[in-house]
Amino acid sequence: MIAGDLDTAHERLKELIGGAQRVVPFTGAGISTECGIPDFRSPGGLWTRNRPIDFDEFLASQEARDESWRRRFAMDAYFAKAKPGRGHLALASLHRAGKVPAVITQNIDNLHQASGLDANSVVELHGNTTYAVCLDCNRRYELQWVKDRFAAGANCAPGCACGGHIKTATVSFGQAMPPEAMRRAEELTLSCDVFVAIGSSLVVYPAAGFPMLAKQNGATLIIINREPTDLDDIADLVVHHDIGETLAPFISH
Ligand code: NAD
Ligand code: ZN
């Protein structure tokens, strides 16, 4: 069922979420656009501006690593300033109320944690861009450290003392999905009675397989996204409205 107007959407969401034991949200870039971070696939989104650098390219060439870091520093204008939006705050409220055990996210912006969820309650399928790690020894590096070294080294991406490459803690195209996050996401998906996909075009796999899995397992599937998705047909409730406006009634202080 597609909820036509916002009032109908609010009514249906309150019924479905209110009556659920365990609600598992699955979020994508759309929940963070109101925080000033562009999504990938909307017109003017990041996708249309830069071809992503694959993991193999990053490993193979210093030039690719330099370019990857230059882009990350350019994006800091968005990421460093961003504050949680109404969608993040609503999910944090539902978490505090005991409805939402954890959030599964494709986002890398750290905004669920910034809205008050502890790190354990955010399952990041694509990692986190607000810090960096050595790909060999897994040592953590802060972005400011990388930035300072980059500037000091004539715009050259620094390496780790162990000889490994330092990369934002994100999952690039061609890089393996994090096994523990995938395991937890599957467990959460199979344990919920309501699954809510929020702000994802649902085209990036394997992440987008979770809404399908939830539905097959008997959960009620809700999709909130301003554009249609390929899974709209199998969803129990589809809301094609702005995420902030749709979820604002669930914010409690
Ligand atoms: P996507 O860009 O493919 O899809 C976002 C969807 O959200 C679009 O269908 C768009 O119509 C919808 N949307 C945007 N703003 C909305 C709003 N205010 N209200 C309702 N709907 C809105 O994003 P994706 O499916 O998450 O896939 C992109 C991948 O890129 C992710 O896996 C993620 O790793 C990465 N990414 C992350 C961020 C972030 O962390 N904020 C931003 C861009 C890309
Ligand atoms: Zn190292």
Image (tube, rainbow, N blue to C red):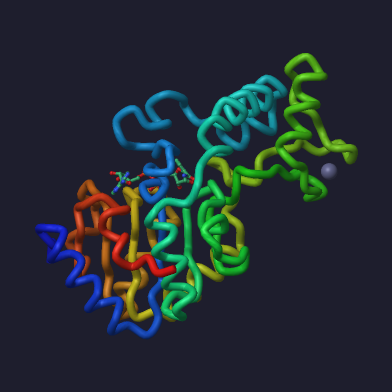
Image position, residue 235 (x, y; %): 22, 66
- The picture quadrant for ligand 1 comes to top left
The vertical placement of 124 against 101, above or below, is above
Percent coordinates x, y for residue 129 in the rendering: 60, 43
Give residue 166's quadrant in the image.
top right
- Please state which of residues 76 and 26 is positioned toward the viewer in this rendering: 76
Image-quadrant location for residue 146 = top right
Q: In which quarter of the image is the C terminus?
A: bottom left
Across and down, in percent, residue 15 comes to 22, 78
Q: Which residue is drawn at 50% across and 31% down?
A: 52
Work out whether residue 151 or residue 59 is closer to the camera in this orientation and state it: 151
Seen as rendered, the residue at the extreme right is 161
Q: Is any part of residue 180 visible from this angle?
A: no
Residue 145 drawn at (x, y percent): 78, 34
User: Which residue is found at the position 24% from the left and 51% from the top?
Assistant: 229
| Screen quadrant of the N terminus | bottom left
Q: Report the residue at 44% width, 38% height from top.
A: 37
Q: In this view, does 171 lie above or below 60?
A: below
Above or below, 200 relative to 7: above
- The reply to whether residue 173 is in sight is yes
